[in-house]
Amino acid sequence: MPTVAIIGPGAIGCAVGGPLVETGREQVLFCGNTAFDRIHVTYPTGPAFEGPAKSVTTPQDLAPVDWVLLCVKAHQVPGTAPWLRALVGPATRVAVLQNGVEHREVVTPIIGDGSRILPVVVQIPAERTAPGVVKLTGDPHLVVSREPLGTAFQYLFNKSRLPVKTTPDFLKAMWEKMCLNSANGSITALTERDQSVLRQADAAELARQIILEAMSIARAEGATLDDSLPTRIIANLANAPGGGNSMYFDRRAGRDLEYEARNGVLVRLGKKHGIPTPVNATLYALLKNLKPRPSA
Ligand SMILES: NC(=O)C1=CN([C@@H]2O[C@H](COP(=O)(O)OP(=O)(O)OC[C@H]3O[C@@H](n4cnc5c(N)ncnc54)[C@H](OP(=O)(O)O)[C@@H]3O)[C@@H](O)[C@H]2O)C=CC1
Ligand SMILES: CC(C)(CO)C(=O)C(=O)O
């Protein structure tokens, strides 16, 4: 039976771990800061899943596994080095389930071999409400590159209720998601209003400007994007069920925000390509300097 370790059993860690536990085809270990012994996933449609879960809070005594699914926020990756050192052996494959475009760049320095790293685009609107408990507010799926590593990852979820799609143009899929995440996280965290704020014309126009900058960077990085993208993203976000997103939940709970991976990266890449990014630079400065609030 393949062994799978999920580092970071938060919203996404539990949303992907639940279906694996449910099918029972892999041995799943949740690796995080808080222990739990049951996993509970609720879906917008269809029955919930609840089952036993094995979790650990220290990498001590762990051996390499077949698959590591890294599901922490981008800024939490360096803190997972002790887990990765214990769990990654010469044959381990590492899927990075994260927003942003730097999946491979942040993990390679820790494990030292980029060829076994699989970036994953995560299309799972979800919120963790307690250790091991996650609520999905929309239908989930994951997207990976159509290559042997991606196909092996897809097979891991075979017969589970989490669809994994493969694409021949992963760069496009990753940057389309990045365009969305540059806008929805920043605007909702700063306004402290859910995505329905994008029904306001001025907020929608701000989102459009953020996305247009992100698209310029994406194209400079080689992604092929359609001009209709901003309109599609804004309409989808404004009408998304629940209206939340991970950065909005983090701001409300007083947790650190993933602004570096969503807006800071655009400013950095803008400098690299000589493309001005005044809107994202402004958001980045505001998000970085938000007054900390006590964790909920
Ligand atoms: N939530 C969503 O709807 C979506 C999220 N994403 C992306 O997926 C990624 C994960 O987000 P999400 O699941 O929401 O984040 P969460 O904050 O819900 O989960 C992160 C988990 O990682 C744990 N963690 C933090 N540091 C460590 C560490 N050093 N070792 C082990 N565990 C650690 C946290 O524990 P603790 O809380 O105890 O610190 C928490 O359980 C992000 O890049 C996000 O942008 C993408 C699509 C949708
Ligand atoms: C919910 C979703 C999929 C889109 O906003 C997301 O990426 C996030 O919450 O970070």
Image: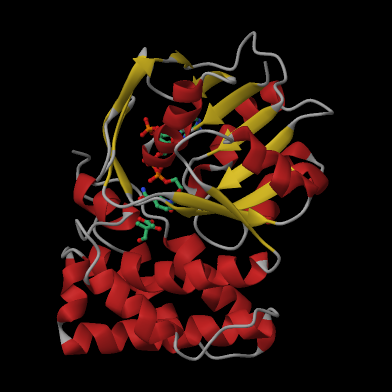
Q: How is the image coloured?
A: secondary structure
85 and 116: which is toward the camera? 116
- Indicate left or right for 284 with 27 as reference: left
**Which of the 4 quarters of the picture holds residue 35?**
top left
- Residue 13: x and y in percent read 45, 35
Q: Residue at x 36, y 73 (%)?
A: 183
- Indicate left or right for 126 with 238 as reference: right
Quarter of the image where ligand 1 sits: top left
- Residue 201: x and y in percent read 18, 89
Rendered view: 60 above or below 23 = above
- Residue 172: x and y in percent read 61, 72
**Which of the 4 quarters of the picture holds residue 218?**
bottom right
Q: Residue furthest top?
A: 61
- Residue 62: x and y in percent read 65, 13
* Residue 31 showing in the rendered view: no
Q: Residue at x 38, y 88 (%)?
A: 209
Q: Residue at x 69, y 55 (%)?
A: 105
- Indicate left or right for 266 with 9 as reference: right
Quadrant (top left/top right/bottom left/bottom right) for the C terminus: top left
Rendered view: 43 above or below 169 = above
* Residue 286 showing in the rendered view: yes
